[in-house]
Image: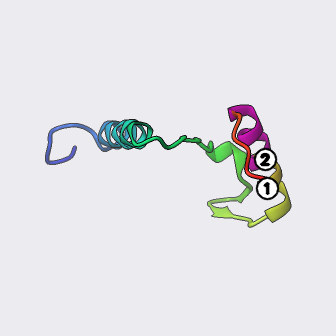
């Protein structure tokens, strides 16, 4: 429980929703990257740059965000 009386996960979810809403209100596009999209070995990132770039490219394409 946090000081505000909600569980930490619930508080994090609320903060994340607020950040996304505020960013969109300011004209930003928000892209969520699921943890399943990055390479892990155990609890640590593997830093597989090629695989990470491929996943990011797919997510950007699906969202209609052009970075070229």
The image quarter containing residue 20 is top left
Residue visible at 74% across and 55% down in the picture: 39
Task: Write down the quadrant of residue 25 in the picture.
Answer: top left
Instruction: Give the position of the N terminus as an image quadrant.
Output: top left
Q: Position of residue 12 (x, y in %)?
A: 35, 43
The foreground one among 54 and 12 is 54
Pointer 1 residue: 53
Name the dominant secondary structure of the magenta segment.
helix
Q: How many marks?
A: 2
The spot of residue 46 in percent (x, y) is 74, 65
Label 2 Cα neighbours within 10 Å, binned few <14 / some 14-19 / many ≥20:
some
Front in this rendered view, residue 37 or 27: 27
Q: Is residue 39 left or right of residue 7?
A: right
Segment tinted magenta in the rendering: 56-63
Contact flag, marks 2 and 1 (Cβ < 8 Å): yes
Q: CA distance from mark 2 to mark 1?
A: 6 Å
Query: What residue is shown with label 2?
Result: 57
Q: Which residue corresponds to the image point at 71% horizontal and 46% vertical from the top-left?
A: 37
Q: Is residue 6 in the magenta section?
A: no
């Amino acid at each position: 429980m946090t000081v505000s009386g909600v569980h930490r996960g619930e508080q994090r979810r609320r903060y994340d929703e607020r950040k996304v809403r505020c960013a969109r209100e300011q004209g930003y596009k928000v892209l969520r990257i699921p943890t399943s999209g990055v390479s892990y070995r155990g609890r640590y990132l593997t830093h597989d740059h090629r695989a990470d770039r491929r996943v990011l490219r797919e997510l950007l394409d699906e969202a209609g965000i052009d970075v070229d």
